[in-house]
């Protein structure tokens, strides 16, 4: 099912989006695959989320929204030139964007009370 969906998205996205459409289709196909896996594992009782997963995911989603919004706003204010520059300059500009995105994400998590220990896996007893 996921393969068929991915190939249909390839056909739909490659025309208007060129090579970016291929990446988008593959990424969305991976999301479909993960969603189906989650749904079926829950349906068959193989996986049951532990307590605290709802707030954990809420904090992660809020931080992703902050990061995405910050990077979207940054594109209007940062004077990056992507078309007529060499590889090293593009790499430097990309590193700046990665640093901004990572900074926004982790500062947002910290502001919500999230700490590195929250990423550690706790074994069930």
Image: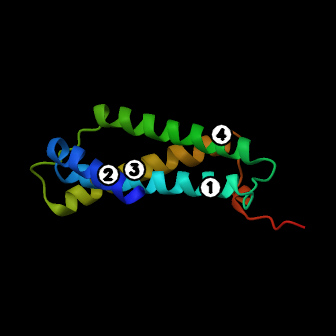
Quick check: 90 above or below 107?
Answer: below
Q: Residue at x 71, y 52 (%)?
A: 115
Q: CA distance from mark 1 to mark 4?
A: 22 Å
Residue 40 disc label: 1
Q: CA distance from mark 4 to mark 2?
A: 26 Å
User: Which tag is nearer the camera, tag 4 or tag 3?
Assistant: 3
Residue 58 disc label: 4
**Residue 47 position in % (x across, y down):** 72, 59
With 82 as the anchor, is 35 left or right in this view? right
Tell me where residue 113 sits by quadrant: top right
Depth check: 46 or 124 in front? Answer: 46
**Residue 79 position in % (x across, y down):** 23, 39
- Which is nearer the N-term, disc 1 or disc 3? 3
Residue at the spot of label 3: 28
Around disc 2, counting alpha carbons within 10 Å, would you say few (fewer than 14), some (14 to 19), or many (20 or more)? many
Asked if the residue under mark 3 is in contact with the one under mark 4, i.e. CB atoms within 8 Å, the reply is no
């Amino acid at each position: 099912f996921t393969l068929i969906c991915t190939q249909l998205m390839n056909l739909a996205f490659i025309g208007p989006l060129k090579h970016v459409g291929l990446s988008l289709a593959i990424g969305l196909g991976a999301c479909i695959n993960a969603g189906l896996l989650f749904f079926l594992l829950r349906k068959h009782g193989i996986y049951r989320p532990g307590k605290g997963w709802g707030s954990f995911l809420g904090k992660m989603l809020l931080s992703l929204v902050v990061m995405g919004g910050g990077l979207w706003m940054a594109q209007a204010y940062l004077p990056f030139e992507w078309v007529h520059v060499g590889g090293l300059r593009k790499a430097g500009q990309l590193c700046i964007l990665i640093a901004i995105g990572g900074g926004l994400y982790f500062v947002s998590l910290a502001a919500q009370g999230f700490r590195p220990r929250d990423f550690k896996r706790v074994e069930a007893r």
